[in-house]
């Protein structure tokens, strides 16, 4: 055992509590450099300081030392000094939580600059680990798959399955061969070959975001696979020059680093200590949260490439509970409530008014750092209406270019009417919300959000977010204890509330009748509006038979929604519907003479509708008519469509009546529409079954006026926007083409109908306002 001393590199920012932390450490003769790094982390954790070692530097040799080599080779002499390059904060880093067991296979996207050594790392991974069965999807940009040849000649035969995507970058579009690659792996799994992980190796120039979208937003992939995270490999020797070559509009290299959930720093042995530190500072200016792991010659412990849990909502909730490190608590006068209260230069304002991610001083060469940063919003003692928050999520996912580029955002929200914390996570426009743990009885409700991006307009984002807050809900009367059985001679209201009988009885009532009951007494008001009430109604809804709607909105205006939405949010839904001037134009039947109601089968269905109604309110125009319509198919028709390769299908006709503004019924126009899905040839990727959507417009030539029409789908899993400038065109071919795995196709198999918001306006009364940038 050898005694060594350690100290932190001069570029490491040390909070006050960590100053003087350097000291001596006993090193076992058998330790590797990596084990020595872990020992330093444990030593600091015992003193309450969080240290995550990036690399250990040798002052005598002047360069970083390979983590996999024996520590005694570099620090074997008594009194050797270890220089530590690390991320340091004033409290211990949370332990890595294991990702909860999932039936789906985790997918890791492995990206990095050309020549950074991805193939070398992949070779080492496949050779060194035997416990896990890994499938590899490899993308090669070019006519000859050179990387695949390198892998096949070395370690690729150790992978369970290899799918090579040649001559194209998988980042460019939602590529069919990427979907086909996952489908091929799925088929092999179903044939009896289980898998533990899938590794997607991208070409050097790939933007990882479209790949994440594909995995997260394609239902047939999400049934079998889930995102574990993104790893970016950075070449320590060339990364500074590569980033220096980037033009302002060249975002791929920035995105690879900014979106990374873990960064591998390769070739640290080929540069001196100063350059390693400079690379670390530059990476931290792009991404201040992802762990950075050093490597030499591709040697990485296999465990570093798994269990990232970047999309695990429980882990995100735990991280947010412990604080992100940048809290600007606007509940207390816009104060800078930094996690490290004693920090010197934390979150300094960049040129654009944003916040630099890590608080280090950077040289003038790092000209991009001032553009990339993060900021937080923290509000205590307030709540956010979940429907208003869902609308805000749609806004933040489509942030206008002038407000910056949002890379990531995440947070914990106190949702009005909900007993559980609402966990939010977004990677660019791929967003997710999920219930977290319950709020404690005495726990103060808090809303906390972190935003990470480039040139973010903090003022604009914060202004919109601040409009969501409302005061936390409080009971009118204290909660009475449940009487003991011996003292309860007869059933009383308190027992009905505690026993759940009240909510079970009210669940089947129209929501307006439930609200009337709430006005009878303070106890009933509390019982119906308390967060626990929604939990009770939700349990009743979940117990309904499969395939039955759990929410209704009728043509006459009656609603039954309290099983899918807190009673406090229903008011916002109804107000948005009324203020938007929406008209339900659904087909009639023997059961529904005046038109079928809107049926909601999940909370996401209802939320998507509520968000759409809010959008309509924001664009309300007296000259614009807003109809909610549904295109339907017979179940047997849809079954035949999916069973027969290359078949086409047409929906039933939908009719709306546009009444004359003068009240003259002779000038009323009856317009009819039908959706057509026709097969589309696809010579580039023949494995894909493609269908183009077109809209058939009936009666356009006999109408009294010419109308411009927008069609917008109302669905939680996808958005389709179609602009028809002149309704007199009999068949309007759209740009919308759907493959067999698209959410629209998956939805039609479950429920053969498509719900649209139809907005129309007479062409001579001016242009029709677009609801989003892609509709104009």
Image (cartoon, helix red, strand yellow):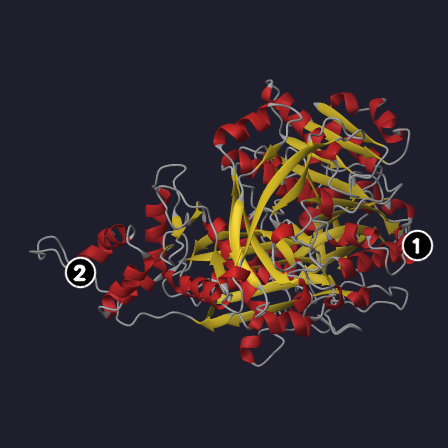
The Cα–Cα distance between marks 2 and 1, rounded to whole angstroms, is 73 Å
Q: Mark 2, residues whose alpha carbon is within 10 Å: few (<14), some, or many (≥20)?
A: few
Residue 751: numbered disc: none
> Can you name the residue that lies furthest to the front here?
666
Please state if 434 lies on the left or on the right of 742 as rendered.
Answer: left
Residue at coordinates 62% horizontally, 20% vertically from top-left? 193
Residue at coordinates 66% horizontally, 68% vertically from top-left? 765
Quarter of the image where the N terminus is located: top right
Residue 493: numbered disc: 2
- Image height check: is 555 above or below 762? above
Q: Secondary structure at mark 1?
A: helix
Query: How far across and how far down the image is residue 760, in percent?
Result: 60, 59
Q: Mark 1, residues whose alpha carbon is within 10 Å: few (<14), some, or many (≥20)?
A: few
Quarter of the image where the C terminus is located: bottom right
Query: How far across and how far down the image is residue 753, in percent?
Result: 52, 41
Please state if 718 lies on the left or on the right of 121 as rendered.
Answer: left
Q: Earlier in the sequence, mark 2 or mark 1?
A: 1
Residues at circles 2 and 1 in contact by the CB criterion of under 8 Å: no
Q: Secondary structure at mark 2?
A: helix
Q: Which residue is mark 1?
A: 241
């Amino acid at each position: 055992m050898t005694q060594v001393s350690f100290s932190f590199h001069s570029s490491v920012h040390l909070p006050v509590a960590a100053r003087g932390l350097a000291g001596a450490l006993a090193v076992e003769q058998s330790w590797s450099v990596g084990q020595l790094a872990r020992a330093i982390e444990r030593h600091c954790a015992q003193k309450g300081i969080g240290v995550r070692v990036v690399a250990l530097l040798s002052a005598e040799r002047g360069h970083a030392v390979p983590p996999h080599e024996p520590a005694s080779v570099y620090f074997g002499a008594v009194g050797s000094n270890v220089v530590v390059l690390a991320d340091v904060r004033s409290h211990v880093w949370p332990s890595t939580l294991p990702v909860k067991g999932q039936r789906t296979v985790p997918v890791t996207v492995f990206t990095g600059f050309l020549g950074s050594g991805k193939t070398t790392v992949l070779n080492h991974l496949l050779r060194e680990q035997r416990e896990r069965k890994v499938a590899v999807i490899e993308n090669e940009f070019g006519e000859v798959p050179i990387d695949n040849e390198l892998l096949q000649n070395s370690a690729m035969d150790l992978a369970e399955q290899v799918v090579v995507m040649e001559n194209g970058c998988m980042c460019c579009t939602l590529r069919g061969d990427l979907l086909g690659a996952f489908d091929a792996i799925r088929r092999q799994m179903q044939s009896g070959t289980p898998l533990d992980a899938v590794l997607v190796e991208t070409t050097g120039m790939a933007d990882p975001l479209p790949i994440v979208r594909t995995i997260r937003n394609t239902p047939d992939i999400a049934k079998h696979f889930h995102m574990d995270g993104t790893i970016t490999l950075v070449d320590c020797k060339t990364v500074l020059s590569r980033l220096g070559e980037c033009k302002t509009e060249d975002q791929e290299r920035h995105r690879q680093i900014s979106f990374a959930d873990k960064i591998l720093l390769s070739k640290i042995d080929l540069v001196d200590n100063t350059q390693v530190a400079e690379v670390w500072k530059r990476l931290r200016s792009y991404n201040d949260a992802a762990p950075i792991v050093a490597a030499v010659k591709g040697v990485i412990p296999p465990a570093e490439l798994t269990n990232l849990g970047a999309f695990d909502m429980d882990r995100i909730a735990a991280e947010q509970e412990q604080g992100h490190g940048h809290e600007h608590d606007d509940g207390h006068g816009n104060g800078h409530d930094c996690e490290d209260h004693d920090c010197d230069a934390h979150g300094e304002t960049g040129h654009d008014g944003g916040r630099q991610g890590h608080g280090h001083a950077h040289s003038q060469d790092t000209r991009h750092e001032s553009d990339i940063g993060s900021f937080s919003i923290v509000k205590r003692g307030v709540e956010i209406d979940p429907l208003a928050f869902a609308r805000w999520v749609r806004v933040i996912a489509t942030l206008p270019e002038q407000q910056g580029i949002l890379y990531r955002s995440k947070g914990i929200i106190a949702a009005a009417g909900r007993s559980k914390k609402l966990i939010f996570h977004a990677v660019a426009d791929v967003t997710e919300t999920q219930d977290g743990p319950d709020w404690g009885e005495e726990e103060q409700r808090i809303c906390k959000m972190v935003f990470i991006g480039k040139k973010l307009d903090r003022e604009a984002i914060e202004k919109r977010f601040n409009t969501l807050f409302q005061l936390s809900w409080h009971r009118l009367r204290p909660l009475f204890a449940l009487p003991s059985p011996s003292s309860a001679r007869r059933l009383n209201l308190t027992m009905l509330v505690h026993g759940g009988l009240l909510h079970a009885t009210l669940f089947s009532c129209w929501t307006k009748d439930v609200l009337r009951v709430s006005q009878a007494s303070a106890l009933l008001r509390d019982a119906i509006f308390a967060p626990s009430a929604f939990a009770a109604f939700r349990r009743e809804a979940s117990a309904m038979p499969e395939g039955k709607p759990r929410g209704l909105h009728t043509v006459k205006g009656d609603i039954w929604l309290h099983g899918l939405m807190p009673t406090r949010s229903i008011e916002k839904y109804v107000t948005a519907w009324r203020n938007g001037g929406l008209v339900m134009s659904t087909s009639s039947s023997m059961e529904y003479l005046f038109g079928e109601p809107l049926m909601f089968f999940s909370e996401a269905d209802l939320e998507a509708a509520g968000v759409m109604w809010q959008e309509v309110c924001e664009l309300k125009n007296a000259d614009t008519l807003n109809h909610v319509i549904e295109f339907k198919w017979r179940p047997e028709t849809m079954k035949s469509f999916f069973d027969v390769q290359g078949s086409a299908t047409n929906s039933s006709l939908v009719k709306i009546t546009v009444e004359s503004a003068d009240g003259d019924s002779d000038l009323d126009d009856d317009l009819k529409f039908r959706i057509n899905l026709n097969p589309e040839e696809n010579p580039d990727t023949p494995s894909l079954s493609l269908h183009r959507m077109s809209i058939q417009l009936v009666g356009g030539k006999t109408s009294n006026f010419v109308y411009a029409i927008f069609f917008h789908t109302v669905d939680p899993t996808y958005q389709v926007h179609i602009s028809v400038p002149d309704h007199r065109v009999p068949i309007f071919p759209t740009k919308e083409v759907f493959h067999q795995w698209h959410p629209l196709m998956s939805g039609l198999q479950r429920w053969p109908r498509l719900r649209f918001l139809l907005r129309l306006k007479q062409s001579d009364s001016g242009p029709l306002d677009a609801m989003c940038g892609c509709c104009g």
